[in-house]
Image (cartoon, rainbow, N blue to C red):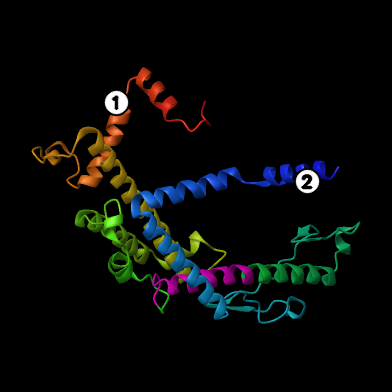
Amino acid sequence: MRAAILLALVASAAGMIDKAEMLKRINKYNWDVKCWGQGNMWAMYSAQDAALKACKGSGHLGYAATAPASTMPLYSQVQVPVALGAYQYPSMAYQYPAHSLGKREAHAPSHPHAYTAASSQQETTEFLQDWSMMRSDLGAQVGNLSCVLQQLNMLTPALQPNLAFITGGWWDTLDLSATLAGQDPEFRTNLNSHVTDCYNMANAMSPAALLRLDPLMNDVTVCRNMVFFKCAMKARTQCCAAAQLLDILELRYGKDDGNIDWSQYGLPRNKYELAAVSSWVLTQALDPVERIVDNFLRSDGTEI
């Protein structure tokens, strides 16, 4: 009986494992190791762990609202301090009919006119309490992340992206000989140019446009940083992919001897961008039979 119960528990736990999430983590790890080298990746992991511990020790984790939800005044402003500053939430005085708000269920009286001012005020108070708690949790999450990014020199003390480090000093922390293409100045220039474009794009966006991206956060600095880092991470993935494609092409066809000026045909001059375009052209040129064989032999088993 004990063995049967144990097996049932193990089977239940196995069923709870998010296989897609685990596969995503494995693929990301293998991807980063291929591009940056295993030693560099573990050094990055260690730095991230140290940054998180430093933020925990300094008390950056676990922010709470300045006033308990039970004492929050109606139609007032609530301040929640986080690492990015103190957010202020505007007054809200919606007169909702009976419906579900947060975890509480309100039941409508038999006659609509019996919905008193007192019950309406209670509904609004409960809604604002839920709103305050949600914003407090969100602010704490952003504050925690900001602290870690500062520890990693990705953000300046003024909470701006540290472009000088990201495009300069960060490279000095790597063993470039262990990377796929880090020793190549053209690769570094290519990635730095993409990241700088992300920085300029984020700074060129108007406050109104930024706030529309995340009206819940309602903070221009946070939204601007979000735009930059999402773009920069995408640029890093694209540049790493181009380096891997170049590596594959060189293994299969040999290195380009430089006798052909590919730009005269409208192709990129940059060898990494050229590799990305060339790989796409070669893939699209497959005939139907070749494509079926290619898809089958490169399948991970989920498509067949």
> Looking at numbered disc 1 in the image, what kind of residue is underneath it?
Ala
Toward which corner of the image does residue 81 lie, by quadrant? bottom right
Element type at mark 2: helix
Q: CA distance from mark 1 to mark 2?
A: 54 Å
Q: Residue 137 placed where, x, y %?
A: 63, 69
Q: Which mark is residue 285?
A: 1
Residue 101 higher or lower than 238, as above or below: below
Please name the residue shown 67% across and 79% down the image: 76
Of residues 179 and 291, the one drawn nearer to the viewer in this rendering: 179
Toward which corner of the image does residue 261 lie, by quadrant? top left
Q: Are there few (<14), some (14-19), or many (20+) residues within 10 Å of tag 2?
A: few
Q: Is residue 7 visible?
A: yes
Judged left or right of residue 214, residue 105 is right
Q: Residue 203 placed where, x, y %?
A: 35, 66
Mark 1 or 2, nearer chain start: 2
From which residue to which does the magenta span run? 136-156
Please name the residue shown 21% across and 55% down the image: 184
Q: Residue 254 placed where, x, y %?
A: 19, 36
Q: Which mark is residue 6?
A: 2
